[in-house]
Amino acid sequence: MLKRTVYNEEHEMFREAFRRFLETEAVPHHDEWEERGIVPREFWLKAGEQGALCPQVPEEYGGVGGDYRYLAVVNEAAASAGITGVNFAVHSDIVSGYLLAYGTEDQKQAWLPRMVSGEVLGAIAMTEPGTGSDLQGIRTTARREGNEYVINGSKTFITAGQLADLVIVVAKTDPELGAKGISLILVEGDRPGFQRGKNLDKIGLKAQDTSELFFDDVRVPVTNLLGEEGRGFAQLMKELPQERLAIAVVAMASSQRAFDLTLQYVKDRRAFGKTVFDFQNTRHLLAQLKSEIEVGWAFLDKCIEAHRVGELEAHEASMAKLWSSELQNRVVDRCLQLHGGYGYMREYPIAKMFVDSRIQTIYGGTSEIMREIISRTL
């Protein structure tokens, strides 16, 4: 890989410390987490002690005040280690990101220190049955009654839905206004009327708890409004680029891991009296994949730096997600092929990567939605 210049020495020291933490506290237990379908809270608390949660949060709220690149390092390192069961991005990049951008001082003081420590886990509830990527089509409502909002509706495919202590709920405070009637509301996990459905049975990312959420006359104080009433859709559009960039980071690190594992495998595996790597077809395929991965890293690093200085455009984040997630699926598929029949065995990492990677072109906005966003700039 070409030398990357987007990170400095401090970021690399942070990466190395976090890598060692994952090797000790996550890698040996990941198979068990996948069997259980959930990551234990003890791990989140240890990750908080390590300083791996919400590293961008300022010191006054319990964080270390790092720049965006620390978030990217966490996501890269986890993907590089094959830790797909812990979705650091939802907790750190997304939920704490919304609180930092739109939270009141009281909201920040109440939640951010405990998110940094891992005592509170966050989730964001956008998707509903039947709506998919169409956020304007949501039906969950938050009706104001005096000093409270009364929330009714349901959400699905919510990452961390089983464990979350704090959920940012996307709801319509005025159903007559369409997108201008959408607001973001904080809902604590112990509110009466808030129920979690079963842990959904996915084909991949088995250790990540993913749930349906139900809201039946859930009452929260109006002080739980995040940002301005009716500005929720605009807030989502402004923050989605960071979510998509996080997906791109994971995609590139996963592509690199698949390539590296496969390169070693084909150099060790023998067929017809020579290694699989000795076949021209193998070398040419790997040369093509290596070239595409290098291009992906270059564009990703450009986007990371642009986001760090507040200059990343929404369509650029969409391009990063589109290219890298499609690349990830392509790389993993080709690498599995080079493993032959062994690639279909779950004991080989490439098999798990195959099912884990498939969601990357779907969540955070499908590839089709990404192309639509990009096309608007043409």
Image (tube, rainbow, N blue to C red):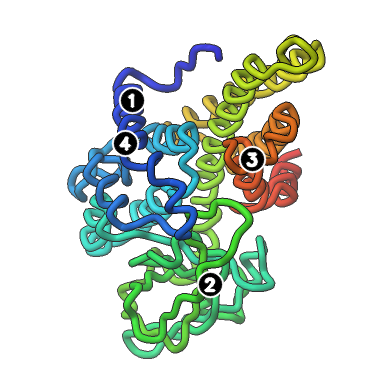
Does dot 4 land on a helix, a strand or a loop?
helix
* Disc number lying in front (1 or 4): 4
Query: Which residue position is annotated with label 2?
Result: 212
**Given this view, does label 2 or label 4 mark the residue nearer the observer?**
4
One can see residue 322 in this view: no
Q: Earlier in the sequence, mark 3 or mark 4?
A: 4
x then y, percent, for residue 148: 35, 84
**Structural distance between the alpha carbons of marks 2 and 4:** 32 Å
**What amino acid is found at the position of numbered circle 3 in the picture?**
Ala
Q: Tell me whether circle 3 and circle 1 mark residues in contact (CB < 8 Å).
A: no
Q: Is residue 77 above or below residue 128?
A: above
Q: Residue at x 54, y 78 (%)?
A: 154
Which-is-in-front pick, marks 3 and 1?
A: 3
Three-letter amino acid code of the residue under disc 1: Glu
The residue that mark 4 highlights is: 24
Q: Which mark is residue 16?
A: 1
Up/down of 109 relative to 53, above or below? below
Horizontal relation, residue 20 to residue 177: left or right: left
**Image-quadrant location for residue 226:** bottom left
Q: Residue at x 35, y 66 (%)?
A: 166
Query: Which of the marked residues, 3 or 1, is nearer the chain's N terminus?
Result: 1
C-alpha separation, residue under disc 3 versus residue under disc 1: 27 Å
User: CA–CA distance between discs 1 and 4?
Assistant: 13 Å
Which residue, as the protein is rendered here, is positioned at the far front?
273
